[in-house]
Image (cartoon, helix red, strand yellow):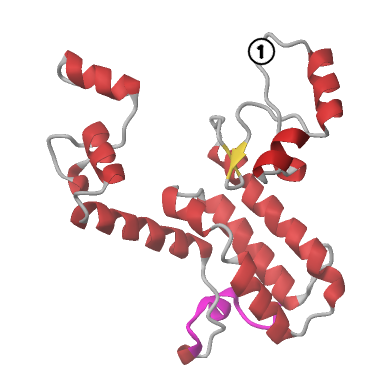
């Protein structure tokens, strides 16, 4: 890997890399290879943009990584002695920014977004989630627009819904994009996006050519 990196300039970042093996690989071999390479083991295919690529039945468990990430950020910022204005800047630029892509693709459980709002409020008022702080204003005040006397923070559930509606609008109006054609072929080939139902199984085409295309993709 070192030779490849020197020749191409594409060096591997071990801190952002992970190893995955087939189920037939003995645990001892996995540990030896991981130690030699200095790259941690990962179950399944690892993560993409912070979310596991292999999901369990519990969406709360899958998206709990977002809450954990928030808690780690708060711990890292705890010793900075930020003012309220500094906290506002950090929360809006980082806290509310990093889950945007994930929320554009998935509907997060309300329990998850509630925890995310709670972590934001706790850090804003106290700066330390391990200690209870007095919330001097209601949570609705923090998420209200500044023109209405609020702080302009995003409510994560409402923000999630707005991003998904935006994607729906793209589907209704951008009929030539590849990803839209894919969704249409899979979930509403003979209807409209507004009438599409939630899928419960792998979609099968009406003829063999459709089946071949779906399974190949």
* Residue situated in front as seen by the camera: 14 or 172: 14
Q: Is residue 51 magenta?
A: no
Point 38% across, 63% down: residue: 162
SS at mark 1? loop
Image-quadrant location for residue 203: top left
Label 1 environment density (alpha carbons within 10 Å; few <14, some 14–19, many ≥20): few
- Visible residue check, residue 129: no
What is the x, y in percent for residue 174?
22, 54
Give above or below for 169 relative to 56.
below
Compared with residue 203, is residue 70 higher up or lower down, i.e. above or below? below
Which quarter shows the N terminus?
top right
Location of mark 1 (residue): 23
Q: Residue at x 44, y 64 (%)?
A: 158
**At 77% across and 36% down in the image, what residue appears?**
2
Corner quadrant of residue 24: top right
- As drawn, is 103 to the left or to the right of 115? left
- Position of the C terminus, as image quadrant, is top left
Quadrant hosting residue 31: top right
Residue 63 place in picture, x, y as percent: 58, 45
Q: Is residue 104 visible in this depiction of the protein?
A: yes
Give the residue displayed 81% in from the left and 62% down from the top: 75
Is residue 71 shown above or below 91? above
From the top left corner, tell me how far across and down residue 11 is, in percent.
Answer: 71, 43
Q: Residue furthest left?
A: 190
Q: Is residue 67 left or right of residue 35?
A: left
In-image side of 211 versus 131 (left or right):
left
Question: Magenta span covers which residues?
Answer: 135-146
């Amino acid at each position: 890997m070192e030779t490849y990196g020197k020749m191409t300039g594409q060096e591997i970042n071990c801190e952002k890399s992970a190893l995955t093996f087939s189920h037939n690989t003995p645990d001892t071999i996995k540990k030896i290879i991981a130690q030699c390479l200095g790259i941690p083991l990962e179950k399944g295919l690892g993560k993409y943009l912070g979310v596991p690529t292999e999901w369990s039945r519990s969406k709360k468990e899958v998206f709990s990584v977002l809450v954990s990430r928030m808690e780690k950020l708060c711990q890292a910022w705890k010793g900075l002695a930020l003012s309220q204005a500094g906290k506002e800047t950090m929360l809006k630029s980082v806290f509310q920014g990093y889950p945007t892509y994930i929320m554009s693709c998935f509907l997060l459980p309300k329990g998850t977004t509630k925890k995310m709002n709670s972590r934001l409020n706790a850090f804003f008022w106290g700066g330390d989630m391990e200690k209870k702080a007095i919330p001097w204003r209601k949570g609705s005040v923090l998420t209200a627009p500044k023109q209405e006397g609020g702080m302009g923070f995003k409510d994560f559930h409402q923000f999630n819904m707005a991003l998904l509606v935006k994607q729906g609008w793209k589907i209704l109006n951008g009929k030539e994009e590849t990803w839209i054609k894919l969704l249409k072929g899979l979930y509403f080939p003979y209807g409209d996006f507004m009438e599409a139902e939630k899928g419960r199984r792998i979609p099968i085409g009406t003829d063999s050519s459709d089946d071949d295309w779906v399974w190949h993709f």
